[in-house]
Amino acid sequence: MLQFISHHTERYTYLDSIAIALEGGCKWVQLRMKDATAEEMKPIAIQARQMCRKAGATFIVDDNVELVAAIKADGVHLGKNDMPIARARALLGKDFIIGGTANTPEDVRSHWMAGADYVGCGPFRFTTTKTGLSPILGIEGYRRIMAGLATLPPRDGGERHFPVVAIGGITATDIPLLLQTGVDGIALSGAVLRASDPVAEMRRLVELTEQRHCETK
């Protein structure tokens, strides 16, 4: 699964970037607007949700649990300094997707025990689209993360699979190696928006991820 994280540049607005991702075939979009107020974010989130619904894509909102509930987004992604995952689960119930940011096997275990549905692990390398970066993981970091999944206790119903999504400065050439570590998905932004033809690049990355994911399973 390829996930697109919205971003704005001198050339593209947040909604422009989401439109590009959807036109390129991306089926999972996260709206991240770290510097925006809730009032600024809401109208953009509503439009983004409508765009994703029309395209049959999952729509995740970064950080804002209240907004997710209000506009009926598909879920929320929570960083280390955002609302605790257990609290978000208590507020949203089981019908919403909850993801959390992780950098270590201990982070992953904590999110699993708190009831998260997936983790976004990173950064793979330095990226300019996010501030306050955790330590760089690299390929070996993801191998350690994936090895740690074997120690997770089963949840209700015996569930043990916990999707891990790699994020942070990832480019097309990184995807094959990252998928070989066993991660379930790739999240990116700049690799698409910096391309001369971002829609074509999104399409290429979606196809590459799907192809390589099948080969590694």
Image (tube, helix red, strand yellow):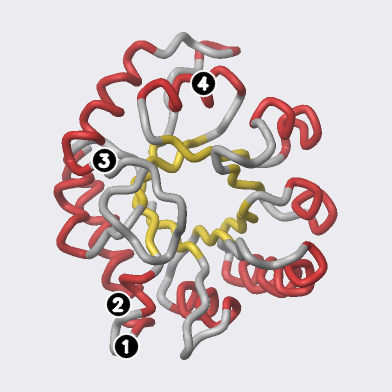
- Do the residues under discs 1 and 2 have CB atoms within 8 angstroms? yes
Mark carried by residue 137: 3
Query: Crowdedness of circle 2 by 10 Å Cα count: few (<14), some, many (20+)?
Result: many
* Alpha carbon distance from label 2 to label 3: 25 Å
- Residue named by callout 4: 110
Question: In the image, is residue 147 above or below residue 65?
Answer: above
Quadrant of the frame with the C terminus: top left
Q: Is residue 6 left or right of residue 49?
A: left
Q: Is residue 30 left or right of residue 175?
A: right
Question: In the image, is residue 135 above or below residue 42?
Answer: above
**Which of pointers 4 and 2 lies earlier in the amino acid sequence?**
4
Amino acid at circle 2 = Glu
Q: Is residue 45 left or right of residue 131?
A: right
- Residue named by callout 2: 201
**Which of pointers 1 and 3 lies earlier in the amino acid sequence?**
3
The answer to which image quadrant residue 98 occupies is top right
Looking at the picture, how far across and down is residue 36, in whole percent?
69, 67
Amino acid at circle 4 = Ser
Query: Crowdedness of circle 3 by 10 Å Cα count: few (<14), some, many (20+)?
Result: many
Query: Crowdedness of circle 1 by 10 Å Cα count: few (<14), some, many (20+)?
Result: few
* Alpha carbon distance from label 1 to label 4: 40 Å
- Residue sitting farthest toward the front: 132
- Do the residues under discs 2 and 3 have CB atoms within 8 angstroms? no
